[in-house]
Structures are given as C-alpha cells and as structure tokens.
Amino acid sequence: MQRAWRLILGVVMVAVLITAQFTSGNSWFPLGTLGQYAYPRDPDGAVINTYMTGTTTVGDEVRIGLTARSAGVTRVELEVHLSELADDPSMLAGIAEVWEGNHPGVELETMTVRQTVHRMIDGALDGEPEERIVLTWTVE
C-alpha cells in the first residue's frame, strides 16, 4: 500500500511540473517555468529590473504593479515587447486602462517604463545601481 501511495504522489508531482511548464505557471513557484534557471548569467554583466511608474492627474507618482491582475501584463511580458513599445508607446494604453479599472478614482496622466541596472564584477554587485528611463508616454 505504501508503494502505491508513493507512486501516485510521484506521478502527481511530475504532472504538476509538466503542466506548469506548458502553461507558464510562474505563480506555481518552485514548480513554475524553469527557463529562468536554464541560462547562465555573466558574472561581470548586469542585472536589470524593469518596472513602471505613473503620474496621476493630481500629480502623485504611483508604482504600477506589473502583474496580470493589476495591470493586465507581467514584467516579463513587458520586457519582451520593450522594442515595440519604444516604437509605439501608445501600446501602453491597454495597461493604463486595466490599471485604472483596478484603481477606481485614480486617473493616469503619464506612464514611464524604468529600469534599475545593477552592475556585477565576479558575481558580486559593484557600486550603486543606475536608474534609466526607457520611455514615457502621455495617456490620451
């Protein structure tokens, strides 16, 4: 009987892992997409964190959480399309619409895609991070 339970548990674990791989189940960590672990990082390279901020119509700066629930897009999805967004920043309109829908009474005036770049030497952080503005778009 114990052998049967172990076999069933093993099959369930493998099924969950395979399902997470094919559905890009990042929220299933540590059983989600393992591609993030598949490529070595350059120990003398940079670690880049992409994020978004917005300025409201009353002048407040807000952080736009890059999750499917909050903004309709994840950070990875945004990073994949950065070159397209640079060519046509109005593509951010969908993100603005979803984010404003999730934050009633708050209207965005501008949206800014930013990056924090951490330089590394021999695999360790080197110096202060650099802040970059990738693009800014005025909400229409």
Image: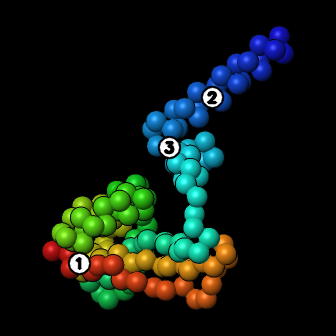
Q: Amino acid at mark 2?
A: Val
Residue pointed to by mark 3: 25
Q: Residue at x 63, y 79 (%)?
A: 121
Q: Residue furthest left?
A: 140
Gap between marks 3 and 1 measured at Cα:
30 Å
Q: Nearer the viewer, mark 1 or mark 2?
A: 2
Q: Residue at x 62, y 28 (%)?
A: 14
- 86 relative position to 77: left or right: left
Q: How is the image coloured?
A: rainbow
Nearest the camera: 33 or 105? 33
Vertical side of 112 occupied by 24: above or below: above
Q: Residues within 10 Å of mark 1 (few under 14, many from 20)?
A: some
Amino acid residing under circle 1:
Trp
Q: Secondary structure at mark 3?
A: loop
Q: Position of residue 126 (x, y in %)?
A: 63, 84
Q: Secondary structure at mark 1?
A: strand
Q: Residue at x 20, y 75 (%)?
A: 139
**Is residue 61 at all visible to an observer of this figure?**
yes
Residue 22 in the image: x percent, y percent? Answer: 46, 36
Q: Earlier in the sequence, mark 3 or mark 2?
A: 2
Give the amino acid at mark 3: Gly
Q: Which of label 3 and label 2 is nearer to you? A: 2
Q: Which residue is mark 2?
A: 14
Find out whether the residues at labels 1 and 2 contact each other: C-beta distance under 8 Å: no
- Percent from the top left, x then y, of residue 20? 52, 38
